[in-house]
Image (cartoon, rainbow, N blue to C red):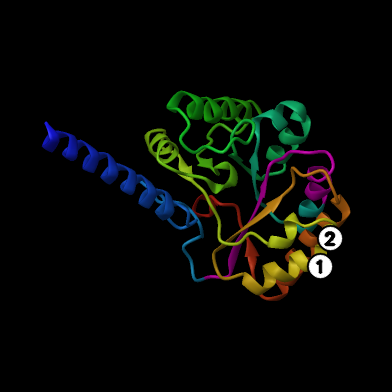
Amino acid sequence: MKQATRFTVYGILIILLLLVLGLFYSRSWERALFIEPYFRIQTEDKLVALTFDDGPSPQRTLPLLRLLQEKEVKATFFMLGENIEKHDSIARKVFEEGHLIGNHSYDHPRLILRSVAFTRDQIVRTDRLIQRLGQKEVRYFRPPYSSKYIILPILLRSMNKILVTGTYDPPSEYKSPYDGQQVAQEVMENVQPGSVIYLHDGIHRDPEAFIQSVDLIIDSLRASGYRFVRLDVPSQ
């Protein structure tokens, strides 16, 4: 009996150790359990993907669309389902102007150790809202906070979806007040061929500084020979 209890304790400890190791393994944007994340475009050419999270919002998305149209740049927007419902016409405009829309969950929960039913609902609800905009296929999913532990990658694989993280997320994007020049400088100092850049159009504050940063990023990268693509670059 004591030996059986000892084996049970050892078994629990081993399972806990594996769970902890799996969690640390999954923290990198380049790794996940059960699925390979899309964290950069596999190319040596000077291609870069601008991605925008948490939108749409009137404050940032509308002026951003005007800028992208002026600069003739296509981007990828990872939208929240609840914001699509609030700003349906803006979300539709993103699609109609030729940008790719990805799923960023319905209301931005951290999808770690959530139930299969909860996680699937976050994905499916937002997929349906994106499809109503006119985009028939929604293959790209970026998890909130880039959290991707156990349930989510298994579910995404079963749904034939692509788990997207990224290559660079400028720290100054999260500072207040927003310094557009600093954000652009950080991107320029860390860009490389195939970079997938995190930016956020769903935040309401500092829209002018945000647009300034994107404007500077586009002009500076173009001057360095970069071209801008959506994440589905092979199909373009």
The three-letter code of the residue at mark 2 reads: Gln
Label at residue 101: none
Please state which of residues 162 and 177 is positioned toward the viewer in this rendering: 177
Residue 233 part of the magenta-drawn span: no
Quarter assignment of residue 189: bottom right
Q: Is residue 134 above or below residue 142?
A: above
Residue at 81% in and 46% down: 60
Residue at 55% in and 56% down: 166
Residue at 78% in and 47% down: 65
Within 10 angstroms of label 2, few (less than 14), some, or many (20 or more) residues? some
x, y percent for residue 230 = 60, 52
The three-letter code of the residue at mark 1 reads: Gln
- Where disc 2 sits, the SS reads helix
Q: How many marks on residues?
A: 2
User: Mark 1 or mark 2, which has the lower sequence index?
Assistant: 1
Label at residue 212: 2
Residue extent of the magenta highlight: 45-66
Q: Which residue is mark 1?
A: 181
Quarter assignment of residue 133: top right
Figure quadrant of the N terminus: top left
Q: Is residue 81 left or right of residue 147?
A: right
Q: Is residue 221 left or right of residue 109?
A: right
Within 10 angstroms of label 1, few (less than 14), some, or many (20 or more) residues? some
- Where disc 1 sits, the SS reads helix
Determine whether label 1 and label 2 are within 8 Å by CB: yes
x, y percent for residue 211 = 82, 55
x, y percent for residue 185 = 74, 71
Q: Is residue 216 left or right of residue 132?
A: right
